[in-house]
């Protein structure tokens, strides 16, 4: 690398760092995105999710899409090499770009004899095929990367989108929290503790005995931030591809067909609308999952879990029992948790700065002080204990759950259950017990072809079976 190239790269990196830092402070209603995407105040709430006015409108040119002709050419040639033949519209659709942006490039490649027109279609399109020269050029592109999916979005545009859709813009109040947790029996005092923590959008410890719903609580937190966001299918960094959209972590939410303006033809198809993500990782977590994972054979990168969780929630379940030490994990995230950005390495070795915008929930059965030192505890402002239910709450849970299993709630049967299977051994109540015991009763009654009801016999069977090794 020459001195001028090094200076240019450093300058570019600094501009991106300044952009992320500036976007992290955005709270105003009028910012416009690098690709012309509307800011917080530019969208009609009747057209989009009112809690997230950001929309990636279709780009007017390759330049506005932050794409070069070489990048698009490489994707087109690799697609045609894999497909054999394809029409111009099919090729544009594969790259998720408007045909009007791809057509001039197709004509230029035809003039250079890189592709040939094999035939025409009734709609006036052409069936494209690689020439010998085009096939050789495609092979050279494949040697670098086999990717020929959606054209990538620039890191700059992605940073803007994260800032525009940040959870820091969402300040859920009591009403939104009650709606998010409506399908979960949760005490009012617990909701009161969770509310400020969720609204702050910072790190949180959820700790307590197993079976009291810590994971269920964490899964519902994201609902309070609003239903949907837009993310790129893939991000491009200096010619390298990083896939962001992951069907395992993300759930697509198609655009409603009722809007006369917000339609697929008006939206940049390189972006996909998803539910605000909740990414959960448990004991299988390794340090490698916190970095971009590159397949050196294909040249394609996969975004780390924290990027997939941006604008949503990242749950570290069963914290303290990962394959990596808590010290390693926490040291890795001290800067991202404080600064709202992270540093990652690309395949070429370049270090890039990316947004870190998510609520991180550490869910554990252990006391936080037994896992981390005071210095890190100070960086996680909220530590919420998920306690065992009281007897009154326990009975209330059965009252709620019985109809869901086709059972009539009988208070005298609850007294029988508690006096026989809980009080003598001082067994603690757990929030998961009503569901699990009622499921045992259901299967018991189904098997014996008996009426579905709580009886001493069915309760004894369920409790003895369930608690046999507890």
Image (cartoon, rainbow, N blue to C red):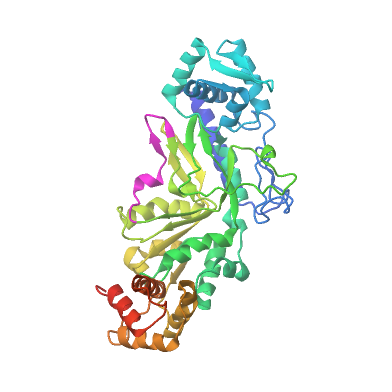
Q: Quadrant of residue 415?
A: bottom left
Q: Is residue 128 left or right of residue 405?
A: right
Q: Which residues are magenta?
A: 283-300
The C terminus: image quadrant: bottom left
| Residue at the image point whose x is 38% and y is 34% from the top | 295
Q: Position of residue 469 (x, y in %)?
A: 24, 72
Residue 185 included in the magenta stretch of the image: no
48 lies above or below 396: above
Residue in the foreground of this view, choosing between 87 and 239: 87
Badge count = 0
Q: Is residue 24 visible?
A: no
Residue in the foreground of this view, choosing between 393 and 335: 393
Q: Quadrant of residue 19?
A: top right
Q: Quadrant of residue 458?
A: bottom left
| Residue at the image point whose x is 62% and y is 57% from the top | 169
The residue furthest left is: 469
Q: Is residue 366 visible?
A: yes
Residue 297 included in the magenta stretch of the image: yes
Residue in the foreground of this view, choosing between 335 and 415: 415
Q: Position of residue 55 (x, y in %)?
A: 66, 45
135 lies above or below 53: above
Q: Position of residue 183 (x, y in %)?
A: 53, 69
The N terminus: image quadrant: top left
| Residue at the image point whose x is 72% and y is 54% from the top | 45
The residue furthest front is: 449
458 lies above or below 201: below
436 lies above or below 249: below
Q: Position of residue 221 (x, y in %)?
A: 52, 63
């Amino acid at each position: 690398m020459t001195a001028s190239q090094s200076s240019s790269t450093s300058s570019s990196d600094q501009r991106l760092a300044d952009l992320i830092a500036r976007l992290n402070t955005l709270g105003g209603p009028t910012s416009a995105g690098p690709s012309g995407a509307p800011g917080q105040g530019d969208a009609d709430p009747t057209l989009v999710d009112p809690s997230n006015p950001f929309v990636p409108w279709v780009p007017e040119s390759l330049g506005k899409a932050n794409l070069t002709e070489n990048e698009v050419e490489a994707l087109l040639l690799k697609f045609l090499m894999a497909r054999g033949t394809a029409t111009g519209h099919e090729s544009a659709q594969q790259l998720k770009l408007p045909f009007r942006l791809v057509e001039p490039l197709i004509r230029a490649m035809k003039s250079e004899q890189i592709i040939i027109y094999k035939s025409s279609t009734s709609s006036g399109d052409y069936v494209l095929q690689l020439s010998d020269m085009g096939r050789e050029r495609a092979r050279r592109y494949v040697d670098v990367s086999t990717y020929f999916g959606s054209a990538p979005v620039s890191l700059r545009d992605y940073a803007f989108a994260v800032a525009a859709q940040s959870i820091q813009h969402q300040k859920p109040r009591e009403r939104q929290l009650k709606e998010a947790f409506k399908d979960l029996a949760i005490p009012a005092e617990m909701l009161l503790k969770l509310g400020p923590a969720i609204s702050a959008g910072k790190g949180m410890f959820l700790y307590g005995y197993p079976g009291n719903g810590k994971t269920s609580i964490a899964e519902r937190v994201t609902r309070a931030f609003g239903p949907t966001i837009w993310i790129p299918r893939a991000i491009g960094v200096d010619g390298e591809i990083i896939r962001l959209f992951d069907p395992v972590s993300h759930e697509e939410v198609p655009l409603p067909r009722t809007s006369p303006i917000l339609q697929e033809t008006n939206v940049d198809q390189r972006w996909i609308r998803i539910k605000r993500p909740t990414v959960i990782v448990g004991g299988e977590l390794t340090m490698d999952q916190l970095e971009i994972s590159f397949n050196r054979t294909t040249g394609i990168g996969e975004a780390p879990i924290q990027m997939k969780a941006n604008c949503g929630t990242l749950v570290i379940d069963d914290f303290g029992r990962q394959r990596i030490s808590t010290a390693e994990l926490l040291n890795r995230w001290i800067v991202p948790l404080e600064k709202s950005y992270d540093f990652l390495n690309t395949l070429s070795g370049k270090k890039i700065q990316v947004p870190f915008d998510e609520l991180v929930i550490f869910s554990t059965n252990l006391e936080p002080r037994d896992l981390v030192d005071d210095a890190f505890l100070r960086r996680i402002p909220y530590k919420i204990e998920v306690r065992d239910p009281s007897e009154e709450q326990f009975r209330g849970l059965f009252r709620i759950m019985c109809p869901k299993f086709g059972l009539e709630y009988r208070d005298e049967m609850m007294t029988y259950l508690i006096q026989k299977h809980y009080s003598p051994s001082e067994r603690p109540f757990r929030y998961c017990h009503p569901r699990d015991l009622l499921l045992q009763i259901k299967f018991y009654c189904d098997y014996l072809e008996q009426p579905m009801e709580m009886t001493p016999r069915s309760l004894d069977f369920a409790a003895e079976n369930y608690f046999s090794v507890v």
